[in-house]
Image (spheres, grey):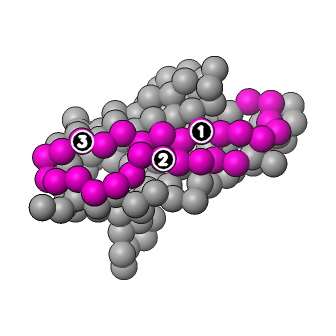
Amino acid sequence: QVQLVESGGGLVQPGGSLRLSCAASGRFVSINDMGWYRQAPGKERELVAAITRGGSTNYADSVKGRFTISRDNAKNTAYLQMSSLKPEDTAVYYCNAEAMTTPWLRADYWGQGTQVTVSS
């Protein structure tokens, strides 16, 4: 019912920047919270940043001051601007969104993931 399509990953040198996008489409009433998670090889998936529909944000300590999450509610799209990237930021980044599929039902959705590699 709801599809999340991520884009913007790739290979970047340490200190560089990337911008990830996550667009929600399909049948839903509205998109509530959106977030970005990441999973590095051999590690558990972890929250990177999240944003409410009203624009309140929270970040993992490891990315505070370097990453910025934002969203465009009219486009049902979330963004993650990543700056001062470090090799330890290398991971598959996943978009997550909570959607109201009806006025009284909510469900959680995940994107397919986009690879971010920070290496010289």
The percent position of residue 106, horizontal first and vertical second, equals 77, 43
> Which mark sits nearer the N-terminus, 2 or 3?
2
Label 1: how many Cα within 10 Å (few below 14, some 14–19, many 20+): some
Q: Residue at x 16, y 54 (%)?
A: 13
Query: What amino acid is labelled 3 in the image?
Result: Ser
Instruction: Work out which quarter of the rendered image holds the C terminus and state it.
Output: bottom left
Mark 1 vs 2: CB contact within 8 A: yes
Q: Is residue 89 visible?
A: no
Q: Residue at x 59, y 39 (%)?
A: 23
> Which element is circle 2 on?
strand
Q: Residue at x 13, y 46 (%)?
A: 15
Report the disc number at residue 107. none
Query: What amino acid is labelled 1 in the image?
Result: Ala
> Which element is circle 3 on?
loop
Give the Cα separation between the discs numbered 3 and 1: 20 Å
Give the Cα separation between the discs numbered 1 and 2: 9 Å
Q: Give the residue pinned by disc 3.
A: 17
> Which mark sits nearer the N-terminus, 1 or 2?
2
Please tell me which residue lies in front, 46 or 38: 38
Q: Give the residue pinned by disc 1.
A: 23
Give the Cα separation between the discs numbered 2 and 3: 14 Å
- Give the residues in magenta: 3-30
Report the disc number at residue 7. 2
Label 2: how many Cα within 10 Å (few below 14, some 14–19, many 20+): some
The percent position of residue 36, horizontal first and vertical second, equals 47, 47
Helix, strand or loop: magenta stretch: strand
Q: Residue at x 87, y 36 (%)?
A: 102
Per the image, is 2 magenta?
no
